[in-house]
Image: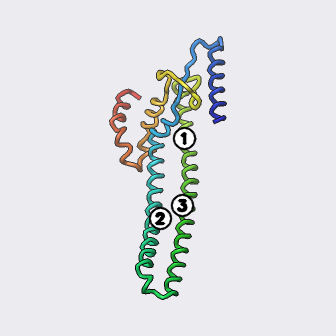
Amino acid sequence: MNLSFKSAIWSVALVAAAFSAPARAELKIGVLDYPRLMDESPQGKALLDSLRNEAAAKQRELQSTAQSLQAKQDKLAKDRATMTQDQVSRTEKELRDGQRDLARRQSEIQDDFNARRNEEMSKLQRTLIAEVQNYARGQNFDLVVTDGVIYANPSIDITGGVLQLLQSRAPAAAAPPAPRPAAPAPAQPRTPQGGR
């Protein structure tokens, strides 16, 4: 929170300094909606799909183990009266051990998932920042700001332009998840007709 406030102060200070510079008659400023860029870029969508699929597979594994333990618990409750005390004790121990193993496995999977998500999100962030910088240079922007912007006129929002650039590269960057790129497909034929 404090970091966002500081970045907002810096953004305002940079804009104020830029406007007060007498040598520059025209200053080209852009604003980027970074959360939207993360959510709507083909690279971001592909990463989220990949992480969801990975998490779903692990969740199915855990559910299968939990169902097996529940079936064993139900069988013990049903057959307890006909079992020897030794059989009951052995089954109860197996259930306790199984529950401990399941809890440990859940924790390991969550830790692994969090580490992988953080690593992949960091890579995506570096990629998107580089793309924004390339876009800003190519469009001759003097300043692009993101976090900490309270209001920006939509005419200076460059998020759509950066998204178009990323979508034009989508076949190479987001080839594995076929369902997601189907929605932007109509926009791709327009880009070549536009002369880019």
Q: Amino acid at mark 2?
A: Leu
> Does label 3 or label 1 sit earlier along the sequence?
3
- Label 3 to label 2, Cα distance in Å? 9 Å
- Label 2 to label 1, Cα distance in Å? 33 Å
User: Against 19, is 149 above or below?
Assistant: below
In the image, is 171 to the left or to the right of 11? left
User: Against 165, is 12 above or below?
Assistant: above
Percent coordinates x, y for residue 156 in the rendering: 50, 22
Q: Residue furthest front?
A: 81
User: Which quarter shows the C terminus?
Assistant: top left
Looking at the rendering, which quadrant does residue 164 occupy?
A: top left
Percent coordinates x, y for residue 150 in the rendering: 55, 26
Marks 2 and 1: which is nearer the front?
A: 2
Label 1 crowding class (10 Å Cα cut-off): few <14, some 14-19, many 20+? few
- Label 1 sits on a secondary structure element that is helix
> Could you say which is closer to the camera, residue 55 or residue 18?
55
Q: Which residue position is annotated with label 2?
A: 62
Q: Which residue position is annotated with label 1?
A: 127
User: Against 62, is 122 above or below?
Assistant: above
- Label 2 sits on a secondary structure element that is helix
- Label 3 to label 1, Cα distance in Å? 27 Å
Q: Amino acid at mark 3?
A: Ile
- The label shown at residue 109 is 3
